[in-house]
């Protein structure tokens, strides 16, 4: 066993796990006070349900099962982790080592944390109006039929991998280092599909719906940036130079994206806002994710800056197009993930158009992004429509107006006793 690799990937798994609480704070601060507990609980549901599904069959479908058509692994081979863990002398341990000489049980943990954060991202688009019970069943179905197969297709030698049939036919290896397609495009398209099915919040587009706690948003953004070091540097699957460079490129791109978003905002509105800074951070983190190991320092910053500007403008499209993506999952994760995935075709060392390559890398990146979009849209639509027809997604209009925290949690986030009516109105 390489103890250095083992320690680093186990630490990275823990950092990635921290990203889901980070996104809970990020999203929680962006909603109104009457919905903050529900927003936090949607992340709790993502953690808990995914944790159970992954133990039973999620791991097997994504990584352990025998390949079925390059789309998914069979759920039986690794059912209840039987391929990854075993009891020896009364103690549970790993069945063996993977190719990087650390226990396969650590891979289970690392990939589980990825699954948790991916489905949690979707919740931001659905804020303030969906039932907790419907959400939890959705998480189970989506991890089973969408996330786990997508992870298999991209990261386990499947249809969209660098050794898959699409890459082979084009003559260039598709590249997604840490989740441009599997995580960000996948989650954003799923979010958009559900939003189109469930409709808008009451008052969307006609009355201001402001974040109730911007410091929460900033805290969430900082936690996400910290956790992202495990997300990207951990995806080197070893304590090595690639992990170190992924840390560096992640920070370079995120810094550039934050500045680009802030300068864009300053030109448009005359202010550098805290919300803009937080959103710019996440846009840069998202965009560098698929490319962190293959773009140079200068190109990582260019990539981040492009993403910062594009995502800043993209977040306003929901008002023009009329879809209520409450917390800009599509604008940040969708546009950022697509930007990073496609720009690999321009900036990747040796294969990108601007870095010594031809057009093949660009072509394969566009194709895998389009296939990921199509797969996510179709699978999510089937699941979301089925849940709409059976359980229903939304609370009633009266419940939404009074506050979803009281409906689903039976609690309030804040005790308003002793506060003046003007202060209460401002908080709400």
Image (spheres, rainbow, N blue to C red):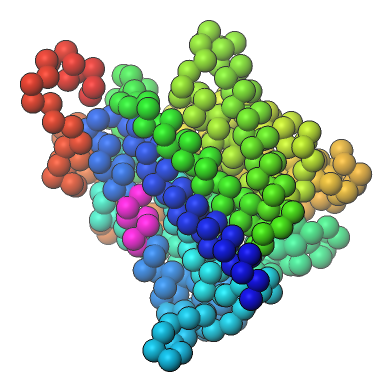
- Residue 200 appears at what percent x and percent y? 34, 34
Q: Is residue 51 shown to the viewer in this render?
A: yes
- Residue 286 appears at what percent x and percent y? 59, 41
Give residue 4's quadrant in the image. bottom right
How many discs mark residues in the rendered view?
Answer: 0
Q: Give the side of residue 48 with respect to residue 77, left or right.
A: left
Q: Is residue 190 shown to the viewer in this render?
A: no
In the picture as drawn, the residue positioned furthest to the bottom comes out as 89
- Residue 395 appears at what percent x and percent y? 22, 43
Q: Residue at x 88, y 48 (%)?
A: 350
Is residue 353 depicted above or below 265 in this figure? below
**Residues drawn in magenta:** 43-49
Q: Classify the position of the N terminus by image quarter.
A: bottom right
- Residue 364 appears at what percent x and percent y? 77, 53
Is residue 101 depicted above or below 302 in this figure? below
Q: Residue at x 57, y 63 (%)?
A: 7
Q: Which SS does the magenta portion mostly show?
A: helix
Query: Is residue 227 found inside the magenta-colored segment of the image?
Result: no
């Amino acid at each position: 066993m390489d103890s250095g690799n083992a320690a680093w990937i186990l630490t990275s798994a823990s950092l990635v796990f921290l990203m889901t609480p980070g996104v809970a704070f990020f999203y929680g601060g962006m909603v109104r006070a009457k919905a903050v507990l529900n927003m936090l609980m949607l992340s709790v549901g993502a953690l808990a349900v995914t944790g159970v599904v992954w133990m039973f069959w999620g791991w097997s479908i994504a990584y352990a099962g025998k390949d079925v058509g390059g789309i998914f692994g069979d759920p039986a081979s690794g059912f209840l982790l039987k391929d990854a863990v075993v009891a020896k002398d009364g103690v549970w341990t790993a069945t063996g080592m993977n190719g990087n000489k650390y226990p396969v049980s650590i891979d289970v943990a690392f990939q589980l944390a990825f699954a948790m954060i991916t489905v949690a991202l979707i919740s931001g688009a659905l804020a303030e109006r969906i039932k907790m019970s419907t959400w939890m069943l959705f998480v189970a179905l989506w991890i089973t039929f969408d996330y786990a197969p997508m992870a298999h297709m991209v990261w386990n030698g499947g249809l969209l991998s660098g050794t898959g049939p699409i890459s082979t036919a084009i003559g260039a290896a598709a590249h997604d280092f840490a989740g441009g397609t599997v995580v960000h495009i996948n989650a954003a398209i799923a979010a958009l599909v559900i939003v189109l099915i469930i409709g808008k919040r009451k008052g969307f587009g006609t009355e201001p719906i402001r974040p109730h706690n911007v410091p929460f948003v900033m805290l969430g953004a900082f936690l996400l940036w910290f956790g992202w070091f495990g997300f990207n540097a951990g995806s080197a699957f070893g304590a090595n130079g690639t992990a170190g460079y992924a840390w560096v490129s992640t920070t370079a791109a995120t810094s550039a994206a934050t500045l680009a978003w802030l300068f864009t905002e300053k030109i448009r509105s005359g202010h550098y806002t805290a919300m803009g800074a937080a959103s710019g951070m996440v846009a840069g983190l998202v965009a560098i994710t698929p490319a962190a190991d293959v773009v140079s320092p200068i190109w990582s910053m260019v990539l981040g800056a492009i993403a910062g500007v594009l995502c800043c403008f993209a977040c306003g499209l929901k008002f023009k197009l009329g879809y209520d993506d409450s917390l800009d999952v599509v604008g940040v994760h969708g546009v950022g993930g697509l930007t990073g995935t496609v720009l690999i075709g321009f900036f990747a060392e040796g294969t990108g158009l601007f870095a010594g390559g031809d057009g093949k890398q660009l072509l394969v990146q566009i194709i895998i992004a389009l296939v990921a979009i199509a797969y996510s849209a179709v699978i999510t639509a089937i699941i979301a429509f089925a849940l709409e027809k059976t359980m229903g997604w939304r609370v009633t209009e009266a419940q939404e107006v009074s506050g979803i925290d009281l409906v689903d949690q039976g609690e309030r986030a804040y005790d308003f006793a002793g506060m003046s009516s003007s202060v209460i109105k401002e908080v709400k």
